[in-house]
Amino acid sequence: MRCNSSPSMTHARSCVSDGQSPPTSSKPALSLSLLDSAAKQLIVLRDFQSAFSTCERGLESICNAEQEEGRCRELKTSLIIVGMQALAELNQWHGVLPWILQNYECPEKIPAKIMQMCILLHAKVGEQAMMQEAGNVWLHYPSNRRLTGFRTVAELYLLHILVPLGRTTEAREFVLGEVGTLAFTEDQKQTALDITEDKVTLGREQPANPGPDLRDVVAVGQSTPQGAVISNVQAMLRLLYRGLSVASAGTFPLRRLFLAVAILYILFVRMDPAHPSSFSWISRLIQVLNQMRHSMFAP
């Protein structure tokens, strides 16, 4: 996949608005404010379209500051992550990768955290093929091999892209090749090869008439009271992960704000306290919190 400076979803951004550009020193502060607004729209208001639009405005405010160290890059990463989640909630999966490439131009320039989320998002909707080329380019780019998240990207690419697509030959070459040597230990290589072989064996033994679709089974399970509780817990875990993912790239007060909003949203919005299925779960949660409080502040 080659670098492409032409936009894939929307018109090309211009950092100059009405012939004027805000001072460079004010851009990080403006971007941080827009990031806060986008997170609120995503998590609290659930206004996904507004959250995505706010992220785009935040990206426009720092598009001329990419050479600045540290803070601007972190803000850009956080805005991209919130925008990805907004697009996912809008069911616009096909637009996620083009939008990211519009902001980073080339796959190899995408931060490791965003590449990890891209792989997981496309694997979730069964569109692994969309990430195969971009992931391969990213992993073979020399500068990315020094990044902290390189090994995680390599593992996700193998397990969620190559193996599900049935690319057994490519998976073996990947594990035994240069990238696999850098990313995996010898034990991890053997485990990866075993997983690849198990996938091949499972494909050969799979019956011609498969059983019911997993999505149908999940839908039936969620129609029962127990399934509803499981669905609520899964939704809460996803929401908490989103909040922490956004918070990890921000400042300390921003992390505390996101964590507080996520917890309050989980307890009072996503899981209805008045619903009978919630009583036992909330009761256990309160017991755990009380035990933690007594352990931390006991004489």
Image (spheres, rainbow, N blue to C red):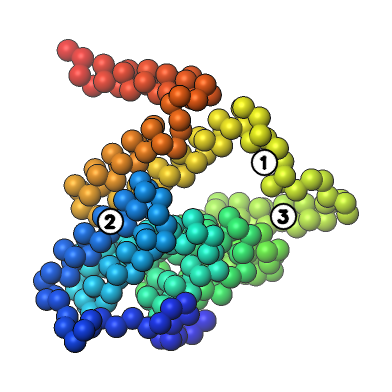
First-in-chain label (3 vs 1): 3
Q: Is residue 38 left or right of residue 139?
A: left
* Residue underneath mark 1: 218
Name the residue at 32% across, 57% down: 38
Q: CA distance from mark 2 to mark 1?
A: 34 Å
Placement of the C terminus among the 4 image quadrants: top left
Amino acid bearing label 1: Val
Name the residue at 61% across, 64% down: 128
Q: Residues within 10 Å of mark 3 (few under 14, many from 20)?
A: some
Q: Residues within 10 Å of mark 2 (few under 14, many from 20)?
A: some
Q: Nearer the viewer, mark 3 or mark 2?
A: 2
In the current view of this chain or complex, which residue is farthest to the right?
Answer: 208
Please state the horizontal and vertical placement of residue 174, each as a whole percent of the image: 58, 68
Residue 37's label in the rendered image is 2
Above/below status of 89 relative to 286: below
Amino acid bearing label 3: Lys
Under tag 3, what secondary structure?
helix
* Residue underneath mark 3: 199
Q: Is residue 116 left or right of residue 55?
A: right
Amino acid bearing label 2: Ser
Of residues 115 and 52, the one nearer the viewer is: 52
